[in-house]
Amino acid sequence: ILQSVFAHYLPPLESFRLPSNLWIRIRNDMHKYLVEKDIDGVPCIYFYHRYFQDYQPWKGEQGQQYRQETPVLEKTRLEYYANEYKTTFDMSYSEKLTKKYNLPPAIISVDRCLTPQKPLIDKQKKQYNLRRLHQLYLNIGRYEYVHYASLFNLDFLTALLLCGEYTIIDFLYVFTRGNYSGSGDSRFLLKQFEMLIDILNPHPSNLPFELVYRLLPFREHLSPNLYNLLDQCLLVCPLLLITDDQRPQYLLKCPLGHVIYSKIS
């Protein structure tokens, strides 16, 4: 469809978007099949047809193709909501436009990068990006390659526990239900969450403090994912690792706003 449109109209050079006149035509010609919904505070447009109810791609001859395409589509979805979708493509002017505007028959490098997702937490307005949160949370135990943006991301964990829709028990149940057998880093962190259920369930805002308390003593031996998570926690919850002998002098030096972790010597 787009190739046929750009045979008569110049494609935008800086960013690739549907021309406004094309979008108007789509809305007018297909209004019976377009359904507008408000999902997580975001207006979305669905393309609906009655044949969709009978469509079962996982059965019959199309089953194998469906099973091959599903992981690719899921990867694209997760990369988009993690702000990692960078796919672009090239286009060229049609012969008609080349003659009409005396254009060089060169390849146009089109920027197809989508608008970046807003942060998970708007701290000024105290609002949560529920659309992004729900999409990253969906099937979280199945796709470990995106855990850097979810399981090991403090903003995601904080938004998940404070948005009012989930608890730490709900979060752990997702992994338990799927018999999760991921990397050692993931299982280690999930084990820490299991031991923190009694604390995080009534007090989810204690998450950064509890993670620092448990990860800081092992900071020299942490994997990159866990170390990055610890760094994120330290930005909002600074701790000092001291012994009993050092405690009196540090109590005099440190401001009261700092939390001090005392290790028995």
Image: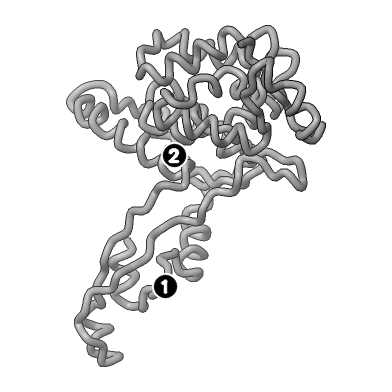
Left or right, 42 with respect to 102, comes to: right
Q: Earlier in the sequence, mark 1 or mark 2?
A: 1
Residue 79, quarter of picture: top left
Residue 59 in percent (x, y) is at: 25, 21
In the rendered structure, which amino acid carries the disc numbered 1?
Answer: Glu
Front-most of residues 121 and 212: 212
Above-or-below relation of 248 to 39: above
In the rendered structure, which amino acid carries the disc numbered 2?
Answer: His
The answer for how far apart the CA atoms under marks 1 and 2 are is 34 Å
Residue 87, quarter of picture: bottom left
Q: Dot 2: within a 10 Å radius of its alpha carbon, few (fewer than 14), some, or many (20 or more) residues? A: few
Q: Which residue was labeled with disc 2? A: 49
- Which of labels 1 and 2 is toward the front? 1
Above-or-below relation of 2 to 208: below
Left or right, 145 with respect to 66, comes to: right
Front-most of residues 203 and 111: 203
Front-most of residues 201 and 100: 201
Front-most of residues 88 and 182: 182
The residue sitting at 28% across, 66% down in the picture is: 3
Residue 167 in percent (x, y) is at: 65, 17
Above-or-below relation of 208 to 7: above
The residue sitting at 82% across, 31% down in the picture is: 256
Above-or-below relation of 36 to 147: below
- Residue 14 is tagged as 1
The residue sitting at 40% across, 66% down in the picture is: 16
Residue 23 in percent (x, y) is at: 49, 63
